Amino acid sequence: MNIPQVRLLLDEREKAAVNAVLESGWITEGPQCAAFHDSLLKLTGAPYGVFAPNGTLALVMALLTLGIEQGDEVIVPDCTFIASANSVVLAGGTPVFCDVKPDTFQIDVESAERVVTPSTKFIMPVHLFGSCADMDAVMGFAARHGLLVVEDAAQAIGVHYRGQHAGTFGDCGCFSFFADKTLTTGEGGFVVCRDLHDYEWLELLRCHGRRQSGSFVHPHMGWNFRITDLQAAVGNAQMAKLRDTIALKQMALDWYHYELDDVDEVQFVSVEKGSEQVPFRCALLCQRREQLSVYLREWGIEPRTFFYPLHMQPCFGYLGSRDDLQFPNAIHGWEQGLLLPCYPLLTRKEVATIGNAIRGFYA
């Protein structure tokens, strides 16, 4: 059996939507983008939003719009994909890492308290693995220290915290539509904000310093951070079945619990109180993780690890953040964390096969 990490839920609806755009002769930003934009605002409840080419550049756009300056420090959790920190560098800032919680692997505000300096201007909570960080704690921390909040909600489309959609608590929230996300356009991103002034700056930033294409007067400096109607057409088709996609992913996670809840060597990553979960993957802590990964591959099952801690990344050696004692939980996640497939097309039989393989390994 071959069970990959990702199997895309694409069908005739996406094909028909893309063909319609090609036949229209209008493939840049147009009516499909407008429709996708409106449906994303309706889904998230955000008052304003703009597209970005991908989730990384969505974060860059948010930081630039909010006025990041050279050398401004941005607190980033140590356990996240490197794009979170890379976006800070690209925007001219300096990422400063804090640890995550040992049970949820969401940002740990107590650890963040230990790295605040006079240069700290932002905090970037990351909603990891399809659930939300403790946004009550994050927003309280930001208020105490006078910080701006940019939420990395790349893995959290359709996820709510205490009834409010991820990405809408801070000054800006950023989403990704990469291929393995719950809603995909292949590549693509979206930035939401609450302030009209920030929204106007986002529009200028993404369209060469002008509010609308077609004008050759550019009041401000800007770049090309747009997407196409081809991508948005796929997004609209995906949006039409988002409720089913979420339900199927949650059902797959329930199957995993049925198969593995009584395996003593395996522990499911917890979810913050008040947060929903739309699983990005099935996230586990496993004894002898590396040997288990090899065993699963022999069964034709593709596992992944948690993210390599940012403070240990060779490319961030210049930051001098290599004190492992400050990041015990991120390191523990790297050493024992295992991500299993949890996509909508995953079958009950495939989850049973994965469960049997894991049971067999520990037996």
Image (cartoon, rainbow, N blue to C red):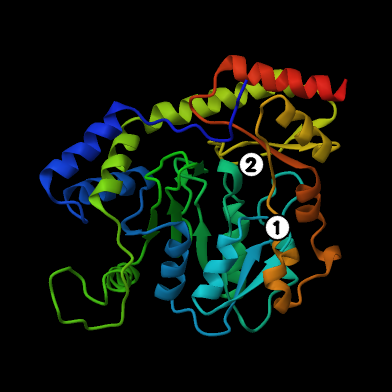
Q: Name the residue under label 2.
A: 273
Q: Is mark 1 on a helix, strand or loop?
A: loop
Q: Name the residue under label 1.
A: 108
Q: Is the N terminus in the top left, top right, bottom left or bottom right quadrant?
A: top right
Residue 332 x %, y %: 81, 50
Q: State the CA–CA distance, disc 1 to disc 2.
A: 14 Å
Residue 77 is at least partly visible in this image: yes
Depth order, front residue of 13/123: 13
| Quarter of the view holding residue 185 | top left
Residue 115 x %, y %: 72, 73
Q: Is residue 334 left or right of residue 238?
A: right
Q: Which residue lies furthest to the top in this view?
A: 349
Q: In this view, does 85 lie to the left or right of 17?
A: right
Residue 147 is at least partly visible in this image: no
For label 1, the crowd category at 10 Å Cα-Cα, with few meaning under 14, some 14 to 19 and many 20 or more, is many
What is the three-letter code of the residue carrying label 1?
Asp
Task: Please report the residue visible at 42 percent of the width from the left and 62 percent of the height from the top.
Answer: 58
Label total for image? 2
Q: In this view, does 352 lie above or below 165?
A: above
Q: What element carries label 2?
A: loop
Q: Is the C terminus in the top left, top right, bottom left or bottom right quadrant?
A: top right
What is the three-letter code of the residue carrying label 2?
Lys
Task: Please report the residue visible at 81 percent of the width from the left and 40 percent of the height from the top.
Answer: 290
Residue 222 x %, y %: 31, 77
Q: Residue 239 carries which label?
A: none
Task: Please report the residue visible at 27 percent of the width from the left and 29 percent of the height from the top.
Answer: 13
For label 2, the crowd category at 10 Å Cα-Cα, with few meaning under 14, some 14 to 19 and many 20 or more, is few
Task: Please report the residue visible at 26 percent of the width from the left and 54 percent of the height from the top.
Answer: 228
Q: Please identify, in this view, whether the residue under mark 1 or under mark 2 is nearer the observer.
A: 1
Residue 25 x %, y %: 12, 49
> Along the polypeptide, which appears first: circle 1 or circle 2?
1
